[in-house]
């Protein structure tokens, strides 16, 4: 009777361990692929949140320029991901500003005092 109760729990535990290790292997392979694809000039994030540009690559190290003229050496494992700039955020903000705000002439008319008397 104990085997009937124990066997399903053992199967569930085994399946959980299998899928957890599979997920971990995929994540590790993605990290290895990223490290092998790094090039000089790439913008990257480190695991500590620093944004930098790659200036030189070694076997296990990478030189990162964190400010103009400031280059530091890091382990390749510290590189978390590559920064990809697809769309410039400033251009998107400018386009939405024009569509959502009233023209300047309307804003001027609203701010003028309605009680202002004009001599004609």
Image (cartoon, rainbow, N blue to C red):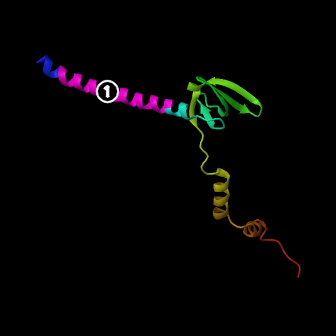
Comparing 59 with 4, the one in front is 59
Please tell me in which quadrant of the rendered image residue 50 appears.
Answer: top right
Please tell me in which quadrant of the rendered image residue 91 appears.
Answer: bottom right
Looking at the picture, does residue 81 appear above or below residue 101? above
Q: Give the residue at the far bottom of this rendering.
A: 120
Q: Is residue 8 magenta?
A: yes
x and y percent of residue 116 in the render?
Answer: 82, 71
Residue corresponding to mark 1: 18
Q: Predominant secondary structure in magenta?
A: helix
Please tell me in which quadrant of the rendered image residue 18 appears.
Answer: top left
Looking at the picture, does residue 64 appear above or below residue 5? below
Mark 1: secondary structure: helix
Q: Residue at coordinates 63% horizontally, 24% vertically from top-left?
A: 74
x and y percent of residue 28 in the render?
Answer: 46, 28
Q: Give the residue at the far right of this rendering.
A: 119
Q: Is residue 120 left or right of residue 108?
A: right
x and y percent of residue 68 in the render?
Answer: 76, 34
Q: What are the residue bounds of the magenta stretch?
A: 6-32
Q: Residue at coordinates 13% horizontally, 22% vertically from top-left?
A: 4
Q: Residue at coordinates 28% horizontally, 28% vertically from top-left?
A: 15
Looking at the picture, does residue 77 appear above or below residue 44? above
Q: Give the residue at the far left of this rendering.
A: 1
């Amino acid at each position: 009777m104990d085997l009937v109760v124990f066997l399903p729990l053992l199967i569930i535990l085994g399946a959980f361990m299998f899928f957890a290790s599979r997920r971990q292997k995929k994540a590790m392979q993605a990290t290895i692929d990223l490290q092998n694809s790094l090039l000089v000039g790439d913008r990257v994030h480190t695991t500590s949140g620093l944004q930098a540009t790659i200036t030189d690559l070694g076997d296990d190290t990478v030189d990162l320029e964190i400010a103009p003229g400031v280059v530091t050496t890091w382990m390749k494992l510290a590189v978390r991901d590559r920064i990809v700039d697809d769309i410039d955020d400033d251009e998107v903000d400018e386009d939405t500003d024009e569509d959502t705000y009233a023209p300047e002439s309307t804003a001027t008319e609203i701010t003028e005092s309605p009680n202002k008397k004009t001599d004609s």
